[in-house]
Amino acid sequence: MADHRDLARDMDLFHFEQHSPGMIFWHPQGMRLFRSVEDFMRQVYQAHGFEEVRSPVALSRSLWERSRHWEKFHQGMFVVGGLASDSGQESEIPAMSPDYALKPMSCPAHIAIYQSRKRSYRESPMRLMEFGMCHRNELSGTLSGCMRLRQFVQDDAHIFCRESDVQREIDNFLGMVRQVYAAFGYDQFSLQISLRPEQRLGSDSLWDHAEAILIQAVEALGHSYNLAPNEGAFYGPKLEISLHDQLGRSWQCGTIQVDFNLPQLFEAAFVNELSKLERPVMLHQAVLGSLERWIGILLEHHGGNLPIWLAPTQVAIASISEKSSDWAEAIFSRLRSLGVRAELHNRDRTISKKIRELSKRKVPLIAIVGEQEALKQTLNLRRLGAVNQQEMSLAQLEQLVGQSPTGEISG
């Protein structure tokens, strides 16, 4: 099995440094991959009714205390100083005060957005999501490449809805999971409902209610599941999705959590049809979880041989000699104009060396162009791992790389 860190080195995606343990240095090829994942997820979230937001990376200690995250997680938070001056004179050097923490998740920030103005029942359900930059001060011994980091981006989503909406929102979430996991090459996943932990917010009656709603919703949708006592979030029970990769491993990635406690702590409310204040249910949702961890799992699942739509470089055009250089440049220009992530390899090296280098980088398609191809305005396509080549027109290549993650022709 190839480790994702070794694959990242061969594919020139990212590396780790002692200067920032548990944090990734992304290379240009790696950022292409990261953005492809992010852009795809943005489209999926938008198609399922979510609005993208952006919240600050540092939030005040008072907000974390109100949400009770400070009490439970402050040892794992990066606390940063706020500027404070005793006299208020600008000429003095301000003292540092530990008033802020880098966010380990976006829940309180999304509550702040919800509460920024009076809300109406007409806005329910309100679905917010962001690619939130999270920081968690994990112990150095637990760090493991992309699989456990101190800085990562999460598809952090929150839904403010009525109790009667919960089943529909869980169905929407599971539809997203099926679509997304299939697009990335996973055809098997399992469900687990994690119940109240020993240390938790709220009353037993609220937990009884939240757990019953979650279990009833999953059963009503016809899904089988396992129960996991004591493994819920500290504010509510959660439905967890574990995918199964080609190596037989199970990875918990997606989750949706039913929360009555944070809306109560923050006194969140909307005006209902009777002009009275009503408390929303808050659902915490992530389809991928950490995007970095998702990419690490993905690299190992595919052995670096990523689907064409996802590959950092989708097509490399390699010319055999100077006589085919102009046609290679024409193919490259056409593909780039269509938004294809293409590279031109027109330098004075043998074609065999070009193929070796591109294959090591796991480029899925190599378009080989010689004198005959230039005369016929065609190309010989070599797929990663294949021995034979296929002669085709530029139009056929455009159609091949224009397929969406679902297999449809895009554009």
Image (cartoon, helix red, strand yellow):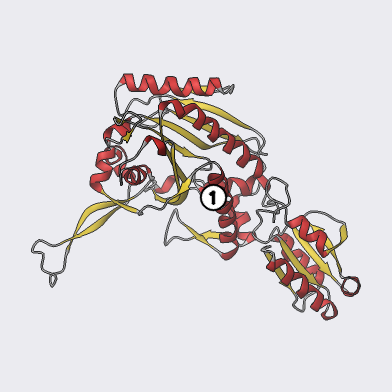
x then y, percent, for residue 106: 38, 45
Residue for badge 1: 42
Instruction: Note whether residue 202 is visible.
Output: yes
- Three-letter amino acid code at the position of disc 1: Arg
Position of 369 with respect to 196 (left or right) is: right
Position of 311 with respect to 67 (left or right) is: right
Question: Considering only vertical position in the picture, is 227 above or below 361?
Answer: above
- State which quadrant residue 200 falls in: top left
Instruction: Note whether residue 13 is visible.
Output: no
SS assignment at label 1:
helix
x then y, percent, for residue 285: 46, 38
Q: Nearer the viewer, residue 315 or 146?
A: 315
Question: Considering only vertical position in the picture, is 174 above or below 348?
Answer: above
At horizontal 65% and vertical 35% (from top left) the residue drawn is 248
Question: Considering only vertical position in the picture, is 145 above or below 19?
Answer: above
x then y, percent, for residue 148: 47, 46
At horizontal 43% and vertical 19% (from top left) the residue drawn is 212
At horizontal 82% and vertical 59% (from top left) the residue drawn is 396
